[in-house]
Amino acid sequence: MTGATLNPLGEWRSRMTFVLSLAAAAVGMGSIWRFSYLSGEYGGAPFVLAYVLFLLLLAVPILIAELVLGSQGRGSVVASVAHAAERSYCSSAWGLLSWLACLAGVLLLALYVVVAGWSLVYAGAMYRGSFSAASVLNAGQYFAELVADSGRMLLWQSLFLMLVLAVVAAGVRRGIGLLAWLLVPTLLASLILLVQYSTTHGDLAAAGKFLFSVQWLDFNREALLMALGQAFFTLGVGVGTGISYGSYAPVRVPIGRSVIAVAVFDTLVALAMGLAIFPLVFAYNLVPAMGPGLMFISMPHAFGNIVQGELFGALFFLLMTLVALGSCVAILEPVVGAVKQRFGLRRVTAVAIVGALAWLLAYAAAFTLDTSTGDGGPDLFRLLDRLAGGLLLPLVALGTVILVGWRLRRPLLRAHLYRETNLFFSLWYFLIRYIAPPAILLVMLGALLTY
């Protein structure tokens, strides 16, 4: 056990708040619109097993490493990395790692804000019956018109961003911690209702065959690479959230077991989302897909042509908004903490500065999606996605495992994982040193080729 100073940014009082906050951060858009499709497309059950294996061998150890960095520093992302490096007599240049994480976070925040704005628009449209008896063509036209209406997108993404800023401005306990206690139970209740509705009114047999049957012909090297990439991105590593939340965690929290619990929760949510989505997709003979095409074209069409679809369609898009809210708060907090502590600002001031930057990026990303301008300009939305997901996140994760696994002193690491067994620590240390670095390089290569 090691002594710990109070975090000037705030702390959580209980392990449950810490775990719930991590869980709210981990469940992202990839769990909703990507995981279940990849499972069906790349072999079903073998893909799920490979994903779980990679989750335990790569993502979980990286998140534990981030939390250990935070528990050492007990401050912002920047302060925690600098303090950890100083205690192990490492170069101050490692501080660049934390600023790269903040940069990746701001870019991803802008993208999430745009998608969350779409979700709010669709929640209202579903409830008003705008997709009643709509064809796939009608649903596609609605999405195209929304993307072309940059003013409308700006309104709703601004309202969503204001909500995110309000939560972070309220602080670690009254804002982020309280949100976690409200968001996770609400997410679970909504998901249970949606799964029950989808399995009752959809084609459960076809969805089960697509998601969970064993299709060895589809399980190839590409499937393994996809499973590796999905496992890496699913827990939100690389944006400083783990470092930040680790610094807020109670001193006696068992970090390793807490992360494993969050990984299990995230996997169960991803599987449940598949059961909430694909029975409806197959009931209307739609082609399985992932990404915005699945969420904003296929699902509105399905909900618009089924009994009580308006109500449950609105619930579905509100669920997407809640998922985006948890992710955005977790992404924003490390950047706000870094700016606040580095420049000695009040929390509200730091929130306003970072929020303004994210708003400008989200506005630019939304405007470049406006096809009506016809100027042939760059698609900033996809450019930011490629830069953050394909380069910055893997780069930050790689720097983290090199710092923790090869530069920080082992006794210091053991002191912050003292609640775990010697076997657990030795296995984690081995994975961080020898397995994670080459795996992250594979993820980076795959992400760059995919994007």
Image (tube, grey):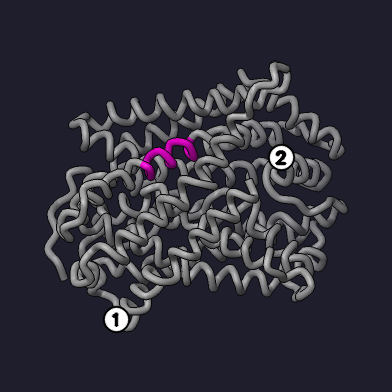
Q: Is residue 104 magenta?
A: yes
Residue at (47, 66) in percent of width and height:
58
Q: Disc 1, disc 2: CB below 8 Å?
A: no
Residue at (16, 58) in percent of width and height:
89
Q: Magenta span covers which residues?
A: 100-109
263 relative to 212 in the view: left or right: left
Disc number placed over residue 39 in the picture, else none: none
Asked which secondary structure carries label 1, the reply is loop
Task: Please state the horizontal and vertical placement of residue 41, each as a whole percent of the image.
Answer: 75, 62
Can residue 449 be seen? yes
Query: For mark 1, what is the residue?
Result: 421
162 relative to 170 in the view: left or right: right
- Say few, some or many: other residues with alpha carbon within 10 Å of mark 2 (under 14 / 14 to 19 / 20 or more): some
- Mark 2: amino acid: Phe
Task: Please state the horizontal and vertical placement of residue 296, each as a whole percent of the image.
Answer: 71, 39
Can residue 311 be seen? no
Q: Is residue 296 magenta?
A: no
Query: For mark 2, what is the residue?
Result: 296
431 relative to 85 in the view: left or right: right
